[in-house]
Image (cartoon, rainbow, N blue to C red):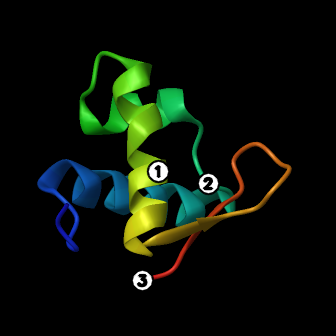
């Protein structure tokens, strides 16, 4: 397992940064999928958890869309 994000994960992080800057909240999975060009929302579901393992995001325990960017 690599300690750096993949190109897809970098795209997702970029998308999350943009949406948080625009709206103040992390984007829903469907919006991430649309913005990064993925046809399957399930392909996006895996990535935030992996980004959390890498230390790039944290997640609140109880709320939907509670991701916070770390770096």
Task: Identify the residue under disc 2.
Answer: 26
| Up-down relation of residue 1 to residue 42 (above or below) | below
Q: Between disc 3 and disc 1, whose residue precedes?
A: 1
Query: Which quadrant of the view contains residue 41?
Result: top left
- Nearer to us in this view, 12 or 48: 48
Task: Identify the residue under disc 1.
Answer: 48
User: Residue at the location (71% across, 56% down)?
Assistant: 66
Q: CA distance from mark 2 to mark 3?
A: 15 Å
Task: Identify the residue under disc 3.
Answer: 71
- Dot 3 falls on a residue whose secondary structure is loop
Query: Which quadrant of the view contains residue 47?
Result: top left
Residue sitting at the far top: 39
Q: Are marks 2 and 3 in contact (CB under 8 Å)?
A: no
| Side of 8 relative to 46 (left or right) | left
User: Residue at the location (68% across, 57% down)?
Assistant: 25
Q: Between disc 2 and disc 1, whose residue precedes?
A: 2
User: Residue at the location (28% across, 38% down)?
Assistant: 36
Q: Between disc 2 and disc 3, whose residue precedes?
A: 2
3 or 1: mark nearer the eye:
1
Residue sitting at the far right: 62
| Up-down relation of residue 55 to residue 60 (above or below) | below
Q: Are marks 2 and 1 in contact (CB under 8 Å)?
A: no
Q: Which disc, if any, is residue 36?
A: none
Q: Position of residue 21 (x, y in %)?
A: 55, 67
| Side of 40 relative to 7 (left or right) | right
2 or 1: mark nearer the eye:
1
Q: CA distance from mark 2 to mark 1?
A: 11 Å
| Side of 46 relative to 4 (left or right) | right
- Dot 2 falls on a residue whose secondary structure is loop
Q: Position of residue 6 (x, y in %)?
A: 16, 57
């Amino acid at each position: 397992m690599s300690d750096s994000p993949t190109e897809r994960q970098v795209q997702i992080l970029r998308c999350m940064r943009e949406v948080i800057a625009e709206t103040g909240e992390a984007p829903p999975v469907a919006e991430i999928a649309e913005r990064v060009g993925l046809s399957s929302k399930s392909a996006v579901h895996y990535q935030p958890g992996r980004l959390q393992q890498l230390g790039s995001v944290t997640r609140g325990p109880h709320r939907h869309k509670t991701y916070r960017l770390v770096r």
